[in-house]
Amino acid sequence: MRLRPWFYNTLYRFNVAPWDKEVRPQLTELVESGRLTPAEYPAALDLGCGTGAEAVYLARQGFGPVLGVDFSPVAVRRARARASAAGVADRCTFTEADITAGPIPGTRDQYDLICDFGALNDTEGEQRLAVARAIHRLTRPGSAVLVWCFQGDKEQLKGGAKMAPMLAPAEEKELFADAFELEYLPTRPRTLMLLMTRR
């Protein structure tokens, strides 16, 4: 199962997307602690950017250029309005694209920092592999990648929880350990927050 753009469009249109309320605290902690700085990681890409909270935050902190990508036209319109209101539209732009469909229009060859707070999670099978390939393709040695996903063993879950997209235990290693160092950051139960560094 994969959720479709119409589903996201509806949530964004009525401002009820539960993940789209504020900047992810793990990102702000990494920036404010100095682990992620615009001097070291200037060019940033937000995959599945939603209405642009994280992308605009990075631009306001001095990162740039920053590009956000989402397949929801409603989200992209709101993200562009957010960047304009924050005064960072000159270095924070957004494009409507399906990350799983191959090269993403408007992207650079490589990025210093990539954020993915749900794009990998919301795909399965070949589409998830396509997101992982995009992350590999758009990074270089030394690039940092921040990834959030639900994670669990569906065989041990009950009811509707089995239907939710999530990574299987250790699936992140199959997807990324060949080319990245994986650091596991603190997060809630049944979720995964990774800070990955490209080797």
Image (cartoon, rainbow, N blue to C red):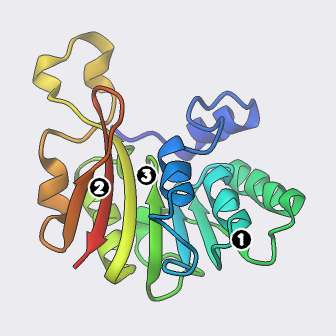
Q: Secondary structure at mark 2?
A: helix
Q: Residue furthest top?
A: 159
Q: Where residue 91 appears, x then y in whole percent?
A: 74, 77
The image quadrant that residue 146 belongs to is bottom left
Distance between the alpha carbons at the discs numbered 3 and 1: 19 Å
Between circles 3 and 1, the one closer to the viewer is 1
Q: Earlier in the sequence, mark 3 or mark 1?
A: 1
Q: Which residue is mark 1?
A: 92
Confirm or deny contact between disc 2 and disc 1 (CB under 8 A). Answer: no
**In terms of depth relative to the viewer, which is nearer, 84 or 39?**
39
Quick one: 75 or 147, which is closer to the camera?
Answer: 147
Badge 3 is on which residue? 119
Lower sequence index among marks 3 and 2: 3
Q: Assess disc 2: are there few (<14), some (14-19) or many (≥20) residues with their C-alpha within 10 Å of its C-alpha.
A: some
Element under label 1? strand
The mark found on residue 128 in the picture is 2
> Is the residue marked by circle 1 packed among few (<14), some (14-19), or many (20+) residues within 10 Å?
many
Q: Which of the 4 quarters of the picture holds residue 154?
A: top left
Q: Residue at (30%, 19%) from the top-left corner?
A: 161
Q: Amino acid at mark 2?
A: Arg
Question: Closest to the observer: 177 or 2?
Answer: 177
For the C terminus, the image quarter is bottom left
Q: Earlier in the sequence, mark 2 or mark 1?
A: 1
187 vs 103, left or right, is left
Q: Secondary structure at mark 3?
A: loop
User: Residue sitting at 63 percent across and 73 percent down?
Assistant: 63
Residue occupying image coordinates x 74% and y 55% = 79
> In the rendered structure, which amino acid carries the disc numbered 1?
Cys
